[in-house]
Amino acid sequence: MSFLQNLIIDGLVSGIKAGMNGVIKKALQGYVGFANLPNQVHRKSVKKGFHFTVMIVGESGLGKSTLVNTLFGTTLYPKKDNVEPTDETPKTVEIQSLSAEIEENGVKLRLTVVDTPGFGDFVNNEESWKPILDNIEARFDAYLEQENRVNRRKMVDNRVHACIYFIAPTGHSLKPLDVEFMRRLHTKVNLIPVIAKSDTLTEDEIKQFKQRILDDIKFHNIQIYQAPQYEYDDPETIAENKEIINKIPFAIVGSDREVERDDGKKVRGRKYPWGVIEVDNPDHCDFVKLRQMLIRTHMEELKEYTSDVLYENYRSEKLESMGVQQDPTVFKEVNPLAKMEEERQLHEVKLQKMENEMKSVFQQKVAEKESKLKQTKKKGFSFNK
């Protein structure tokens, strides 16, 4: 192929690429205003308020209510010091829901805590997980019903966004009930395992216990929530997420009471003859990292994962069981950056295919022209003879 032919084809292909890409970067001549979009979203969110539903599961006496009060800095659960014993013992796990609206620096949060009294407290705990699973799925069903309404402007999200699972500080390994519960629920809710009352264990015992728990979780293919990492996270965020991941399962101590240290300073914690355990001291327990992940840095991501992955998987299975055929790609979790890269590669393949086809057609037409020219020359040569 001649230089002129290649030049023509390359020009045509470049023109097609420019037309299909169609994105031109331009510098602004002045302030336009769309840089204020994040502030608009912030104002709207603050005005509307936020909501979060957390479930707490574990045996009695592991400090579940105390931890909730400590996490959110308010007395959601009253003290149970003067509760009178009842003659009747519940024979099944109860599901109790408590909602409260709390406010911090003008930001309102509608917090719902789902408690599960009775879990693990019976002689036979074989199906203690079932009422809890039923409750989570019932909340999914309620949201699905709202989605199917004609008017969906006032949808209420009561889905469980996180489940804090309390593990007794035995120092050995997970109990069969622990494994069964997490195995049954890990596809329905964001599981956050914590070692309750970790002040009953030494530092070495906590380290060994954590490793045994992680080994059991891996062996049984249980999925627990871990702080996600994104490609464009700054180094500080990446380091913080790594610290959080390394602390799982969180060894926690809960206390909503202030005690006095030897230096006279008052702190939230527990006082023992040998010293003070400070709740908010990361050198004493993992409470700070748990609070950071659950509230300060990953609350919205917990909600998004619940909505985009856990709920959509349940919704898809539910509709398919009802005979509704679903596109398997609809509810698949999509990484936007990976999706863009995939589309870019497909776009390049398409362009390459078009380029090859154009070259083939052009070569064919050039060959036809050259053939006609040769035939014309032959006829002219014969005529001159």
Image: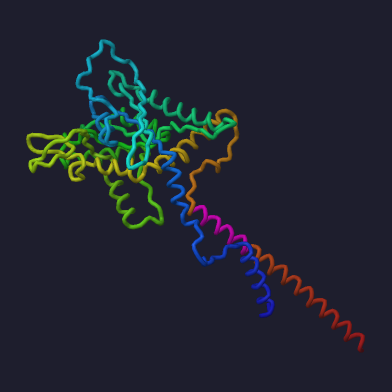
Report the side of 30 relative to 181 (left or right): right
> Looking at the figure, which quarter contains the N terminus?
bottom right
Where does the image place residue 6, in percent across and percent down from the top left? 66, 76
Please determine whether, in this image, residue 367 is positioned above or below residue 351: below
Residue that appears at 14% across and 39% down: 266
Where does the image place residue 46, in percent across and percent down from the top left? 41, 42
Q: State how many labels appear.
A: 0
Residue 349 shown in magenta? yes
Please determine whether, in this image, residue 291 is positioned above or below residue 127: below
Where does the image place residue 214, in percent across and percent down from the top left? 29, 40
Residue that appears at 10% across and 34% down: 272
Residue that appears at 28% across and 14% down: 89
> Looking at the figure, which quarter contains the C terminus?
bottom right
* The quarter of the displayed image where residue 101 is located: top left
Magenta stretch: give its range.
Answer: 338-352
Residue that appears at 33% across and 25% down: 116
Could you say which is closer to the camera, residue 187 or residue 41?
A: 41
Residue 165 shown in magenta? no
Name the magenta segment's main secondary structure. Answer: helix
Report the side of 280 relative to 163 (left or right): left
Where does the image place residue 325, in percent across and percent down from the top left? 60, 34
Task: Name the residue at the top extreme.
Answer: 87
Way the structure is coloured? rainbow
Please determine whether, in this image, residue 101 is positioned above or below residue 350: above
Report the side of 117 relative to 311 (left or right): left
* The quarter of the displayed image where residue 149 is located: top right
